[in-house]
Amino acid sequence: MPASRQKTVKVDLGGRTVPVPEGGLYDRYGMETDLDEVARDPRVSGVDFFRKLPKTRVDSPIGPTLTPNFYYRVSTARLTMLAPARAIRSRLPRELAPLEVAPGLGLVSAMFFRYDVCDIDFYTEAAIGVAVKPARHGGLGLFDLVAALKNEHLDSYVLSLPVSTEIAQVRGHDGYGFPKWVTGLDVDIDAHRTTARVANDAGGVDLALSAPTPAQKSHPSGERVTSLTSYTSIGGAWHSTLSQTNVLSAGTSLVPRGVRLTVGQGRMADDLRSLRPMRTVQFDVVTEGQLALHMPVPTSVRTR
């Protein structure tokens, strides 16, 4: 059923009222989703990854909630580009520094996400982010750089993070401190092609992507689990948010061909232009994965 015709119910998140699909996972379970019920969904390969990640109840800016937030069927695309470290640094808080892969060169990414089955129901998302040095005391080691370049563990700062639903916006903005807003956002990813379109306030193109999907390799559940740490400021205090991806089918193209990234007019386009991207170096696509998104925790950030 089209989202515009789907019946909704109202739920409260820390004093904010948002609609969610009637009869959807959040309507029925809140964040206490029945894993046995999810396992019966034909879109979901299995739930063993989540059975080993028990949820805990925590207080948060959006009220008491359970963490992690589980995403049972996801697909993602990440276009990584080289950019001048000076341009990246101009967009970072002074406490953070770009991850430099060579003197004066950093990494920026345009990312697109499709969450088919998750605790807060279907939505899509896009992001402009930059790779940063781990915000901890001490210098960057070779291990950190290699892990980041292989996408095994990334530390990032996000400039733009539009989403397609109100619950995702409120949770992401109020609960996590991310720069989220709601807009028209289409993401379609399969084994052959990857396309995405983010609308601006006027309904035109903010950012769009069209590219052949890199050849995919399958992985047994739990064999390849990558992680991403994102830094945000909540109430004037630094926090880190950990997300863990159980990669089930993925592929990478180095210096990819046939990638068309349309940079239009809007918040994402402005953010990307400000980073002055120079060259696309890598295109990563996960056609099937699972995700655990933990609530932010306070973190110490090195004074620079």
Image: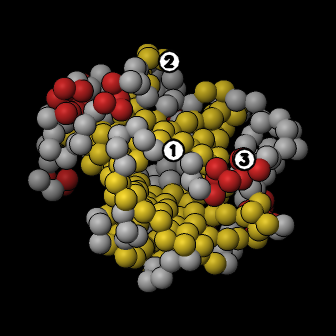
Tag 2: amino acid: Asp
Q: Which mark, by number, is residue 59?
A: 2
Horizontal side, residue 295 vs residue 238: left or right: left
Residues 6 and 201: in front is: 6
Could you say whether the residue bearing mark 1 is in a helix, strand or loop?
strand
Could you say whether the residue bearing mark 2 is in a helix, strand or loop?
loop
Residue occupied by mark 1: 226
- Asked if the residues shown at circle 3 and circle 2 are in contact, with their CB atoms under 8 angstroms apart, the answer is no
Crowd band around label 2 with a 10 angstrom C-alpha radius: few (<14), some (14–19), many (20+): few
Q: Earlier in the sequence, mark 1 or mark 2?
A: 2
Tag 1: amino acid: Thr
User: From the viewer's perspective, is the residue at label 1 or at label 2 nearer?
Assistant: 1
Give the x, y percent position of residue 55. 40, 20
| Residue in the picture at 24% in, 27% down | 35
Q: Which mark, by number, is residue 143?
A: 3
User: From the viewer's perspective, is the residue at label 3 or at label 2 nearer?
Assistant: 3
As drawn, the residue found furthest toward the right would be 304
Residues 179 and 141: in front is: 141
Tag 3: amino acid: Phe
User: From the viewer's perspective, is the residue at label 3 or at label 1 nearer?
Assistant: 3
Could you say whether the residue bearing mark 3 is in a helix, strand or loop?
helix
Q: Earlier in the sequence, mark 3 or mark 2?
A: 2
Give the x, y percent position of residue 86. 81, 66
